[in-house]
Image: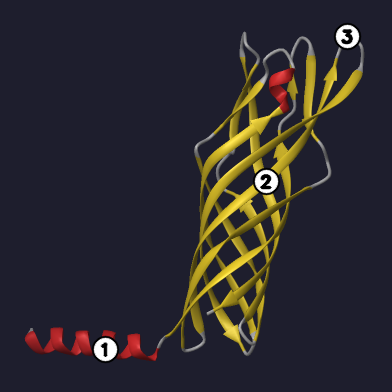
Amino acid sequence: MKRILILTALAVYALGTMAQIDLGVKAGLNISNFKSSEVLTQDYRINPTATGSLGYHAGGFMRVSLFGIFIQPELIFTSISSEYVVEEIATATEQLAKQKVGRVDVPVILGAKLGNMRIGVGPVGSVNVSGTSDLKDFSGYEEKIKSATLGYQLGAGFDIWRFALDFRYESNLTKLGDYIDTGQVQEKFDTRVKQIIFSLGFRF
């Protein structure tokens, strides 16, 4: 048993010395699109707009590489936004309502390196830390945002010297919002976020 433990410890130590570990920072832009069900009440019809909204993100990452395989956990602050078309049924007039959400994302990407190119996929956990919504202006309507969500990211990246360029797609596995509170009743409102993410990183 002692020999097995010693050999295991030596193997872990050897792998640790062979692995390349990089720390870095990254920032960039994200285009978010909210997919949600229509809300139809006695006074209003509420739908998300079809166009994506521009946001941003910034944070840090660690990349551990060994034998062409890498794992990259990250800690990122992300700002996403969306717009809703609010139609007043009685007058058929429409207005835009904007919503912003700030969140802390923790993606963990597992992938392979092909020369200077990387491909990877992994889960991302998000904790919502701030939010504003113009839906409050419509008779007290307000979307109830979940405190945390789970999703996934997949994409490709390129390393040029110490710079890292990444392109990713993100989708949610859980809903961002459950319902809209009209002040009298709660209307179901299944909201899910999809993102296209562009970022530039620097490895120390």
The quadrant in which residue 141 appears is top right
Element under disc 1: helix
**C-alpha gap between disc 2 and disc 1:** 44 Å
Q: Residues within 10 Å of mark 2 (few under 14, many from 20)?
A: many
The residue to which callout 1 is attached is 11
Q: Amino acid at mark 1?
A: Ala
The residue to which callout 2 is attached is 80
Mark 3 or mark 2: name the one nearer the start of the chain. Answer: 2
Q: Amino acid at mark 3?
A: Ala
Give the vertical position of 163 relative to 84 (above or below): below
Element under disc 3: loop
**C-alpha gap between disc 3 and disc 1:** 73 Å
Mark 2 or mark 1: name the one nearer the start of the chain. Answer: 1
The residue that appears at 49% across and 78% down in the rendered structure is 70
Element under disc 2: strand
Q: Quadrant of the N terminus?
A: bottom left
For marks 3 and 2, give the one nearer the viewer: 2
